[in-house]
Image: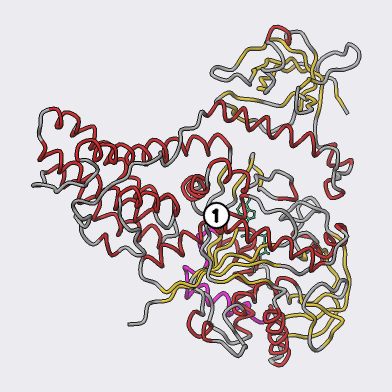
Amino acid sequence: MNKKTFYITTPIYYSSGNFHLGHCYTTVICDAIARFKRMDGYDVFYLTGTDEHGQKVQQRAEKAGVTPKQFVDKLYDQIVELWKTLDISYDKFIRTTDEYHELTVQKVYEKLLKSGDIYKSEYEGLYCTPCEAFWTESQLVDGKCPDCGREVTKQKEESYFFRLSKYQDRLIKFYEENPDFISPKSRMNEMVNNFIKPGLKDLCISRTTFDWGVKLPFDEKHVAYVWIDALTNYITALGYLQKDHANFDKYWPADLHMVGKEIVRFHTIIWPAILMALDLPLPKKVYGHGWLLFGNDKMSKSKGNIVDPFFLTERYGVDAIRYFLLREIPFGSDGNYTNEALLVRTNADLVNDLGNLVSRTTAMVTQYFGGNIPEPNAYNELDKELINLCTGTLAKVRKDMDNLSAPDALTDIFRIVQRANKYIDETTPWTLNKNGDKDRLATVMYILTECIRFAATLLKPFITKTANTIFEKLGLTSPDNFDGLSEFGKTPVGTKVNKGDNLFNRIDVDKELKALDEIAAKQNSQKTEETPADDIIDITDFAKVKLCTAKVLSCEKVAKSDKLLVFKLQAGNEVRQVVSGIAQYYTPEYMVGKTVVLVKNLKPAKIRGVESNGMILCAADGKTVVFVTPEKEMDSGKEVR
Ligand code: ME8
């Protein structure tokens, strides 16, 4: 019997800069879904790749003094390395500079011209180069790009247009007939109310102001608009309009396009309209996930708050990072990344729950049965509770994954782990051993090893390497499917376990946070020497920051932190509480009475549970930190500018 197919895609990543943890988020989620579906019996095709054309790439290459191709080749190597590090199991990697892709994009344009969906005219609009997107005046936020907040420029050029407006009614009808097409539901409303209802305008789909792109076959002055070039990757990768189109016949339409929420518009309006024009079936689902935030801001290269995935995987191991991304962020919503959350999550779930269960069980089987998994005897009610939990979990996890919720799936799998740990405390195997109750002890050990086998099988799509290590420890072959979960008791009696090293080592959170701060301070001090041109702000940006003098009324250490001080500051008529990370450089007594510079309009935040309303300006060189103070005596509350 032919297996059911499942075609899943990530967006193709821009080849314009360093990749950060936010990019890994989409790819790791898709990887977990793809792996789960494969183990669950589907014939999966998982596609990812790089988006290598466009003005942005051309400009960056020029700046770097290399050709665009040299520039994208380097970034391609980097991202392939990153996906290898994160154990991403894609079936195909597409580059938009691949020849077959470029040729097919040309064929697509020809087809659209022939069908009358493309016409030539002139475009005048506001263009955001970093996002490669045109905006209307009303879509701008404070006169800037609504996606990235950067300047837009007026651009006028002869262009080809796609008759997007023609598809407005068909799109609305399609949404109505396929209510799950855009998920989560809130994003569907956003698309309909913000974009479709105000009326779709024809889309400019060619550019003449730069040439790093796919040349239009019928007018070589023009290159394809990067978004059309990029979106078509989902079908060119399968062989659409190519000699070998077996994959296209087999896998299209896509079951799932997973994308970040800011590019849902391209995938649910432009892409379906193009497919309608090409007379092709539409994807079954577009899921717009939330952002990984870093201090409440989208983590992105342009905003300079990147968390380097190579650094993190090297320091904590790939599975700690995969687990965090999959477990911590409520799917569909934005979620905050903090070093502390990563460390706490790793300690709680991977070290305490999973690591402990595996090491305690393998140690006891080794100590009490010479390392051989013993034969169980009659199961009592307590045992049956665990058995039922194990055998019932796959169905729950399957449902969670159908809802694309990795956090729920992991919560359900960890119920086995947590229940098994509790079972150890309830059955107290050491007492059974002391009392010579070998029969019961054997049953308890067997139940525990089976619980681990169930959990590890289910964990395989999520924490790939750790799951395999657990199977090695159990002396079992790591399975490629869920068949072994059909019944409890499949572990052969007599299998030899191997305790080996801990799966994860406990992290001293305070010490580690301090070490990370030191590394960050060092990196920042190196960075200030070369401010890139695109980080320059104008006077209106600067004027947004309200600075004033403030007098320290009181200062204390924050409990359980050797880094933080909490201040009461007099700022004119106001008293403010501010937390600052300078405890290693100043004592509270020294600070009282000093005049500091306060950032007044910073969004309030809780730092280690303490409310902070502003920030104290300091200078740092990686070795020490000093606070900034007026050169002469100055009253509090005076503007600093
Ligand atoms: O958009 N949190 O590429 P891209 C979560 N080339 N996801 C994030 C994120 C964050 N902080 N930052 C980025 C493009 N992403 C186009 C796609 S597809 C035909 C063309 C996600 O490199 C982002 O939402 O800017 C998107 O889904 C993916 O990374 C690639 O972003």
Q: Position of residue 518 (x, y in %)?
A: 68, 29
Q: Quadrant of the C terminus?
A: top right
Q: Which residues are magenta?
A: 166-186
Q: Position of residue 81 (x, y in %)?
A: 62, 58
Q: Sort mark 1 into few (<14), some (14-19) or many (20+) by Cα contacts within 10 Å.
A: many
- Dividing the image into four quarters, tell me where ligand 1 lies: bottom right
The secondary structure that dominates the magenta segment is helix
- 111, above or below 638, in the image: below
Residues 149 and 172: in front is: 149
Q: Position of residue 385 (x, y in %)?
A: 18, 46
State the residue position of label 1: 86
Way the structure is coloured: secondary structure
Direction from residue 257 to residue 496 in the image, left or right: left
- 497, above or below 172, in the image: above
Q: Position of residue 549 (x, y in %)?
A: 82, 19
Residue shown at 63%/42% (left/top)? Answer: 294
Q: Residue furthest front?
A: 370
Direction from residue 73 to residue 463 in the image, left or right: left
- 236, above or below 244, in the image: above
Residue shown at 32%/50% (left/top)? Answer: 455
Residue 618 placement: quadrant: top right
Does the segment drawn in magenta span residue 171?
Answer: yes
Whether disc 1's CB lies below 8 Å from ligand 1 is answered no
